[in-house]
Amino acid sequence: MHSAMASFHSKTAPVFQKHYTEPSCRYTGINNGRIGIKGCGKSWRINIGKTRLFKGGRGSVVQCCSSSSTPSAEDQRVLRLVGKVGLREKPEYGKDQFGCLVNEYGWKVRRLVEEDGEMRKVAQVQAQAFHVPVALFNDLFFEFFQAEVLSGLVYKLRNSPPDRYACLVAEPASETEQEVVGVVDVTALRDEAVLQHLGGAEEYLYVSGIAVLNDFRRQKVATALLKACDMLSILWGFEYLVLRAYEDDLGARKLYSNAGYSVVSGDPPWTSTWLGKKRRVVMVKRSDLRE
């Protein structure tokens, strides 16, 4: 699981040069169609094909795609390079890490802040989405399940490199409202059973745990979360995104299909006929990343 990040270099890759006086250069997000970079010291340079960026201060921006459009090939190269710069060292988690990945449909998506209150809120959102009610002592079992979800989240945050796992949260785009209404986990994996469908890729981004509070469903929150996963795949340099859905969950499958995912395989039939489990399908999307 903790293997090296997939390389984006190719024979047609643009020239990339960078000079730093400090190792703390990090990507701070996209704002009004611009990529922000801070903490790079007094001098640095990025040459990307014909695009050059020179800076003598503490931070700068380079023109990029807007939040409502598909990144151009050149924009994608910039995103991938900046993503690598920002992950040279494990940064502190916070709202400014990756900044706002997506701001659409009235929702903005960012990386989870690694603090107690927000982690508990994320666990609550996912627990409400995935808890199966029971006839007796349902509240007690829910509390146990929520604690288990929180424990798993903390473990992944503490033990995963920042370019191998991210928990993304959706909240209202309004500055006056700060409430986590949706969550998704994104993890770099290399399962051979999945890789055989990915045309020679060495690893992929696995999208899981997508959950939206009941009061905010059918309001494009999940769509915004999936778009943020797309942006993260570009930042981290992954060509494929993968997720699983229950075969009979037509609503979820329609959501994923509309987001660009296609079914490539499924659980063996005997898992449902012999074991009584609901059959899942594997859905794959090729990132907007282009070499």
Image (cartoon, rainbow, N blue to C red):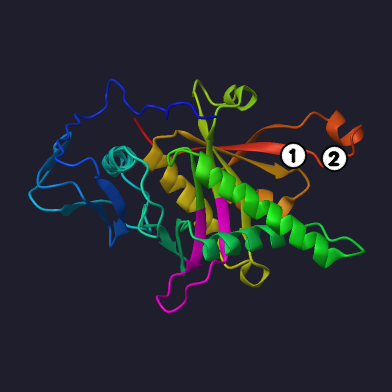
Label annotation for residue 134:
none
Look at mark 2 in the image and give the residue it sits on: 277
Total count of labels:
2
Position of residue 106 measured from the top left corner of the image (x, y, whole percent)? 46, 70
* Secondary structure state at the residue bearing disc 1: strand
Which three-letter amino acid code belongs to the residue tagged 1?
A: Arg
Quarter of the rendering occupied by the C terminus = top left
Instruction: Give the left or right position of residue 62, taking residue 77 as reference.
Output: left
Q: Does the magenta segment cover residue 2?
A: no
* Secondary structure state at the residue bearing disc 2: loop
Magenta segment range?
Answer: 168-184
Position of residue 118 measured from the top left corner of the image (x, y, whole percent)? 53, 63
Look at mark 1 in the image and give the residue it sits on: 280
Q: Quadrant of residue 281?
A: top right
Quarter of the rendering occupied by the N terminus = top right
Q: Is residue 65 visible?
A: no
Q: In the picture shown, does residue 18 fall above or below 209?
A: above
Q: Quadrant of residue 271?
A: top right
Query: Which of these two is toward me, 131 or 248?
Result: 131
Position of residue 231 measured from the top left corner of the image (x, y, whole percent)? 41, 47
